[in-house]
Amino acid sequence: MNAAVTFRDLRKSFATEAGSTVALSGVNGAMAAGRVTGLVGPDGAGKTTLIRMLAGLLTPDSGSIELDRTARVAYMPQKFGLYEDLTVEENLTLYADLNGLDRTARETRFNELHKFTNLGPFTDRLAGKLSGGMKQKLGLACTLVVAPNILLLDEPSVGVDPLSRRELWQMVRALQETGITVLWSTAYLDEAERCDDVILLHDGAVLDQGSPAKLTERVDGAAWRALLPESNVRKRDLQRAAGRLPGVVDAQIRGRYLNVVMGQTGAAPDLSPIPALKGVTAERIAPRFEDTYLAALRGEGRATALARTHPDTPPTPKTNGVGQPVIETRDLTRRFGDFTAVDKVSFTVSGGEIFGLLGPNGAGKSTTFKMLCGLLPASGGEALVAGFDLGHARADARGRIGYMAQKFAYLGHLSVMQNMTFAGGVYGLSGKLLAERIEEALTTYNLHSYTDTPCSELPLGIKQRLALACAVLHRPAILFLDEPTSGVDPITRREFWGRINAMADEGVTVLVTSHFLDEAEYCDRMVIIYRGRLIAAGSPDEIKSAGGSKDGASLEEAFITLVENYDRDHPP
Amino acid sequence: MTKKSGNKMIDKQRLTGFIRKEWLQIVRDPSSIVVAFVLPLILLFVFGYGVSLDSRNQPVAVVLETNAPEGRDFLASLRATRYLVPRLAVHRGEATTWLVSGDVKAIVLIGAEFGERLNGSVLPSQPGQAPVGAPIQVLINATDANTGRLLAGYVQGAWGTWLTHRSYTTATGLPTLVNVESRIWFNQELDSHKSIVPGLVAVVMTLIGALLTALVVAREWERGTMEALLTTPLTRAELLIGKLVPYFGLGMGGMTISVVVALILFGLPFRGSILLMVLSAAVFMLVVLGLGLAVSTITRNQFAASIIGITATMMPAVLLSGLIFDIRSMPKFIQLFTYVFPARYFVDILKSLFLVGNVWPVILPNLAALAFMATVFMTITVVKTRRTLD
């Protein structure tokens, strides 16, 4: 196995307001020729910096990059430079011209690319009018105009629905068969499993590298699962209880199973201390890639955050409003001109429920979400939150909800303390009460050591904690979360959901949007919105069986089946 | 399959491909067409009609305290001028109230002894009366100094005309001792439009030119297209030429429209050579496009670029180009400051070409200065354009 690209001890710092931040601190690695290497890590790990260096767009402060003599490197940036007011054909032509492809060579190449990307029928469409998935394919096509033998892809699957994501992978595999070496960077751990090799990047350093199989081998024998018996005990209560058992480092609900990762390999978890799980035995399963990541982070001593995920105080489920409908939509419709973005969507969310609003980008979930929050008036039907139409309700009705935006809405140059004071003030908290609440939040969310740090300099995980702390400072009964965990590492994600679960136990109703279907496992119930319509509703298990999936299958597979069925029954 | 293009500075295929892309973007996105063709029209209309240094129909209070027929006669002659609109006040107090409240811009006081003073038989001065020897008194609200000065001139002019006229019609009139005959060159009607509009063309085109390019490089950065461009063999020279050519075309189109509007709508003469006009317009366009490109390249942010573009061009172009305020009457250090702004050179050239003709001693040094500035801005842009993201 020879390396197409080798890099040694790459270092890079960027100047910031407060001195400099280290993006890469001595990164070593290689891309094996003819294989797909996954560059995996959360946002801010240094993936883009590394790729830009390999593409020759950034010079390392120190270290070296060795490329094969015959290397023709092509790079697709995360925000690929498509000109939205140019057509598909014109975009391709531009990149062909810039790369000096002559007329005859161009024609052959374009034909190949059209066939390869299925963009043939859309050559005259403006790039701006393509769907997220199609844009990404066009970006890939423009990158491939030069017929590279090394292809660098920076987060190609961000903002792409599961169907297009699958297609992108098929395309990359097809490219690999023609001998192209591919680097695919991603924050999604399930994608890492599809790669031939993985470079695990965290905080500007390589945590681990090798084939996914080899990496997961290390935690072989640490992953177990137990079939949950039918009972009235809520699954997330079981999850919480299991997470606190001795020797357990991670407990997750996967459909009807409780998946457990142990700190030591070999020994099965003893579930007997949990009354509802008496007599249930766990079976050994193949570890997932995520488990490796957790193990690697644990090795780095970063897993301490995990302990805090599960509060020591036992949950005290409150009954106020629990079971009562809190959020209701009836035939909710929104039209933009001729285009119906949301078409007669009806669902009900009960108090204390974690409810998912899922669907690919552009399906209408954000529009639905905005109508619920009262940010966008409905064209038809109604959306009631706690009995109010938030578009018309007075401020005190709005004070009953908390909102965490997709891009954390903190003020970057203000400190953590200033941001919290501002957020509290916006919701009418002041004086002693505000000071008390902030003090409480600083403790609950472990933010004491950051009170004076400007938010723009916080690590992503901390920013996220702060965003949640700010959103719930005024103790809302209903919490809206818009894509809350995209791009964060698994530990931060667990920590986040631990807190959300705790709030739901206290009777807070949580509505969460996500295009990341793995996340849906955390929801009690969910709806899937596709092409403006509600195409499926129910618990994760119900969705899976509606999608015809077998036990243990992922929601994503169920989702793809549902969407394909819908497309077949309702041709666009 | 890839053509051998090596590291040539300029490759025809790359350049034409890039220019075609820029052109398509211009055609598809109407905003740059609006900036190039509609904005100059709007600005020319607004400034051309709004900014006038002539004062017409200025309200003036007249206090007539005399019964002498000469008094009424003078009032009639005040009424006859198109610059003033006399309004008769009952007494001084009322006139003063009008002046203070801004209803009138000046008071013309025709005192009780108007007739006597006019004929030279005057009593010693008494408090509260017009000074000895002066038959009328004029009080002017000079909060707007320029208008005030003009008004004083108008009243004085009206008085002089009346006196002259009187000396012809009455035997008792004062003989006119000196006769001044003025000749006004280049702008016979003293129409301030004719001196302002050429400068206005320069100001408007400064703004348009800088705005056109200020946005384009920043836009590539903001939309993430620059990163993709950097991965292609496109050179700095090609990037800059590719950005300049289409916007140069647009800018010259806007310039043509402005000149045509100046000639037809504002009735300006054109006394220079058209060839020289095109040449200097082209050089000037390079300066302002270069300024825009430099700003855009440095800031990489459309909003910042447009704000800097406007403040760096519009304000100084209006105030410091000699368009409204004569540069020679500014303090010395401000005069030095004006040399930084390209508009001042073009204003001089345009005034000469429109109103006078090909005055080489005016045009050549100004053109040379513009050529120098174009070089400076282009150099800045080239130096600041990076082929990497560092």
Image (cartoon, helix red, strand yellow):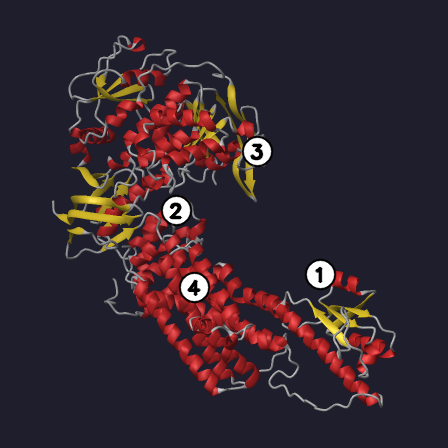
10 Å crowding of disc 1: few (<14), some (14-19), many (20+): few
Chain of the residue that carries numbered disc 4 in the rendered image: B
Q: In screen coordinates, is A412 left or right of A569?
A: left
Residue B108 against residue A494 in the figure, above or below: below
Q: Is residue B370 left or right of residue A245?
A: right
The answer for how far apart the CA atoms under marks 3 and 4 are is 42 Å
Can I make out residue A89 in this image? no
| Quadrant of the frame with the C terminus of chain B | bottom left
- What residue is disc 2 on? A134
Q: Do marks 3 and 2 both belong to one polypeptide chain?
A: yes
Q: Mark 4 or mark 2, which is nearer to you? A: 4
Q: CA distance from mark 2 to mark 1?
A: 71 Å
Q: Can you tell which mark lies on residue B100?
A: 1
Distance CA(mark 4)–CA(mark 2): 31 Å
The chain carrying label 3 is A
N-terminal-most mark, 3 or 2: 2
Q: Are marks 4 and 2 on the same chain?
A: no
User: What amino acid is labelled 2 in the image?
Assistant: Met
Q: Amino acid at mark 4?
A: Thr
Q: Residue at x 42, y 58 (%)?
A: B305
Residue positioned 60% across, 85% down in the render: B186
* Label 1: which secondary element: helix
Residue B213 has which mark?
4
SS at mark 4 in the image: helix
Q: Residue at x 36, y 71 (%)?
A: B376
Asked if marks 3 and 4 fall on the same chain, the answer is no
Q: Which residue is mark 3?
A: A391
Disc 3 secondary structure class: loop
